[in-house]
Amino acid sequence: MRLMRRRSRIRFFEFIIWPAAVAAIFLLPSKMLILTEIAILALFAVSLDLVLGFAGIVSLGHTAFFGIGAYTAGLFARHYFAEPVTGLLVAGVVSGILGFATSFLILRGSDLTRLMTTLGIALMLGEAANQMGWLTGGADGLSGFSLGPILGLFEFDLWGRNGYIYCLAVLFVTTMVARRIAFSPFGLALKAIKSNPTRAALVGVPARRRLVIAYTIAAVMAGFAGALLTQTTSFVSPDVLAFHRSADVLLILVIGGTGYLYGGIFGAIGFTLLKDWLSVVTPQYWMFWIGLLLVILVLVGRGRIARWIEYIPQRLTAAMGGKP
């Protein structure tokens, strides 16, 4: 219990990142669109970190839940109810149902089997979205729907300010819930299963049940991220189910580190800003530089940024005369 309380304490960087995200509303009014993109990517990455960093479930098809959430939000707004928060919740539920249904297939076999199974599910859904033009709009995408005010009060504005605030609020609430889960007895059980599933089973941890629950929760969170993308752009296409989205979110976790949730947020910030800058400086070769960064980070180690974040405030405290 003492270890769990120590790990669940609010860390130094948490006092910086959330106030900074709020301050960006006023300090960077012309950057609302890219900030919204960062918030959506961060939520997507946090959802994957919950299953990869804590439960040890590797996936190349996490975009399946992102895409299902995106299409659900668009179809719900077009045919039923245009209020965004309601659509967000419905998208999360549908993605969670898909996550629960597929978890029994994915939890079978080795990591390689899981990689191929998750990738296959995402590819099948992508092809279905492309072929079912009567429902999804096919390759042209789903458009022609409008969204009402958030909670009936706040309209999506042209500059994206309210959209960013909405995405940031969803990211904050979801991250706090995920943080609570990760540092609860349930989260510690996931860590035990990841470290040694045989030993965890011997001490009475119901490994399969815990992994199914974790995978379903992560699917809900990924569905939220997809819904936010649809709601802030008023458009959804088969691209939301493309393989490159799974590759991007894995790269984000390589940049930010896994197993502490905030790696997804820091990774999303670094990845988006780097991609935006490189696409301007070297528009033809930006993917090469991203790939080179991936190789370097893999060689250096996934958790290096996390260790740097822990190390810097300790050194600052020591330099000011406090205890390191």
Image (spheres, grey):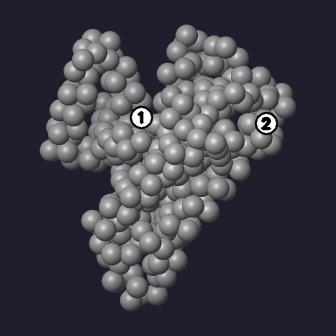
Query: What residue do we see at 35% from left, 78% from top?
Result: 197
> Residue 131: x percent and y percent?
52, 45
User: Residue 83 — which label?
Assistant: 2
Q: Residues within 10 Å of mark 1 (few under 14, many from 20)?
A: many
Q: Which residue is mark 1?
A: 268
Horizontal relation, residue 18 to residue 157: left or right: left
Residue 136 vertical position relative to residue 158 in the rendered view, above or below: below
> Residue 114: x percent and y percent?
35, 65
- Amino acid type shown at disc 1: Ala
Residue 216 vertical position relative to residue 124 in the rendered view, above or below: below
Towards the viewer: 127 or 246: 127
Residue 282 vertical position relative to residue 317 in the rendered view, above or below: above
Query: What residue do we see at 37% from left, 64% from top?
Result: 117
Horizontal relation, residue 142 to residue 237: left or right: right
Query: What residue do we see at 44% from left, 72% from top?
Result: 105
Towards the viewer: 255 or 80: 80
Q: Residues within 10 Å of mark 2 (few under 14, many from 20)?
A: some
Query: What residue do we see at 46% from left, 87% from top?
Result: 204
Residue 164 vertical position relative to residue 195 in the rendered view, above or below: above
Q: Is residue 48 visible?
A: no
> Residue 162: x percent and y percent?
69, 23
Q: Considering the numbered disc 1 on the image, is that residue within a helix, a strand or a loop?
A: helix
Q: Is residue 198 visible?
A: yes
Q: Considering the numbered disc 2 on the image, is that residue within a helix, a strand or a loop?
A: loop
First-in-chain label (2 vs 1): 2
- How far separated are the C-alphas under marks 2 and 1? 27 Å
Check if mark 2's residue and mark 1's residue have beta carbons within 8 Å.
no
